[in-house]
Amino acid sequence: MSTVSSVAPRSGRTTELVLVLGAVGIVGLAYVNLGLATTGTVPPGLAALGLGYLGVSLAFHVVLRWRAKYADPLLLPIVTLLNGLGLVMIHRVDIARGRDIADGVALRQLMWSALAVAIAAGVLVVLRDHRILRRYTYVAGVVGFSLLLLPLLPVIGTSEFGSRIWIRLGPFSFQPGEIAKISLAVFFAGYLVQTRDALSVAGRKILGLTLPRARDLGPILIAWLASLGVLVFERDLGSSLLFFGLFVAMLYVATERVSWIAIGLGLFGAGAYVAYLAFAHVQVRVLLWLHTFSPEALQTSDQLAKGLMGMAAGGMVGTGLGRGRPDLTYLAESDFIIPSFGEELGLVGLFAILVLYALLVERGLRTSLGTRDGFGKLLAAGLSFSLALQCFVVVGGVTRVIPLTGLTAPFLSSGGSSLLANWTLLAILLRISDHARRPLPDESAQNAVGEARTEVVKLS
């Protein structure tokens, strides 16, 4: 006689704790290395900053043990390492530009990191079940599109570096598009769960590709026009690409039809070509992309050229942390933080960072596969793809694979709005992964409890 019993899977929290300690240790070693390379001494604030960063990371780990016991154990360590390395490189740029830690960008970034972790912990505590978000599908859509339109308002909207993607309230500035990508992912997931059956219906077959019916093309056309509106009015190629790419990717996941990808690529190519012919700022981006070192391009901007030369100076293993000149490139701590790492850590170090991003996206997609409800599958896939697409756009822009867009590397680049949005995105992914990995209730145990309760009622 054999007995079959269910075995609860391991939560992975101990593994997560060990990996978080290792990630904080790597960040601490990088900070010590930076101090020895620039001043020849161990940084005096090492203990305070190291313990502070460790405390913030462990606090979030404790929240996971409390509220999301079965969440993916690799997501937090990966993000902890990325965020910490970003802090070290931002401090490196501060040193190169003669700013001490009190006046530099790194301290402000550390405070934004602590606030972002606190908000992410709050999301985990308040959001008990990710499926609650489905109730607010259209509210999330309104919020997302409103956030995209905020920079166009005459009083609070501001234009920086040719793009109108910021709002300013007194001394504070914020990029609402970072939060909009989360709201739009919730909206797309809720909308596509309701309409994917209609969108999956096959239409005519042309050149071996089964196209959808003509009346089902409305949603993708609306998304295309909205992304073109962002490109035209806000002059933001990165957000336009991210917004439209997110919708097409989630549409493919919902319907499993390659034809939607083909239609999306065709619409994007047509829109990009029309924008190139019609708008001067798009022509400038293409000029800097195709002819980076030409006199015309260098007269317009030498930022991309300097970033490429910095990465070339780094070579395979880099100049060494603290021994390069990343400060020669404009916005080396934000838009061009990837070339900063490429110069001082070399191709090897840069590939290690890209592997961390790849693991982060892979764990998100694994969460999508393991989730038992359609809304959670689409939301996890959309959030993961938004990270992947943003990384591709950033790295592709600074390496001349695609035109430069101005997006920032998630968790690495300086910027409060980016940190707040990406840590919130991580919290939602952790909540979905907790639901995906949590064991199902044992039906036999439930039946036994029910029978026992029935027997007690009869006896009473």
Image (tube, grey):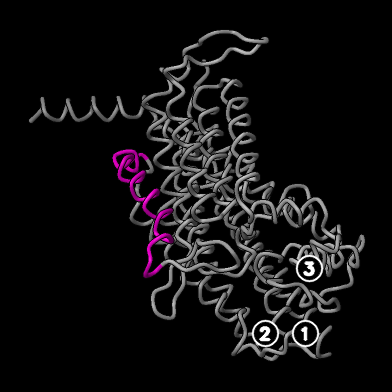
Q: Which residue does the numbered mark 1 point to in the structure image?
A: 35
Q: Position of residue 374 (x, y in %)?
A: 43, 29
Q: Residue at x 86, y 58 (%)?
A: 347
Q: Secondary structure at mark 3?
A: helix
Above or below, 444 relative to 365: above
Please name the amino acid that badge 3 sits on.
Gln
Q: Which residue does the numbered mark 3 point to in the structure image?
A: 299
Q: Secondary structure at mark 1?
A: helix
Judge whether residue 135 is colored magenta.
yes
Judge whether residue 397 is colored magenta.
no
Q: Nearer the viewer, mark 1 or mark 2?
A: 1
Observer-nearest of 19 and 210: 210
Observer-nearest of 257 and 374: 257
Verify CB contact (< 8 Å) between mark 1 and mark 3: no
Q: Nearer the viewer, mark 3 or mark 2?
A: 3
Q: Earlier in the sequence, mark 1 or mark 3?
A: 1
Query: Which of the image's four quarters has the C terminus?
Result: top left
Please name the amino acid that badge 1 sits on.
Gly
Whether residue 171 is visible to the viewer of this picture, yes or no, is yes
Range drawn in magenta: 131-156
Verify CB contact (< 8 Å) between mark 1 and mark 2: yes
Above or below, 68 relative to 63: above
Q: Position of residue 235 (x, y in %)?
A: 55, 55
Name the mark on residue 46: 2
Dominant secondary structure of the residues highlighted in magenta in the image = helix
Side (left or right) of 83 relative to 315:
left
Q: Position of residue 328 (x, y in %)?
A: 79, 76
Please name the amino acid that badge 2 sits on.
Leu
Above or below, 355 relative to 57: above
Observer-nearest of 427 and 313: 313
Q: Residue at x 62, y 34 (%)?
A: 270
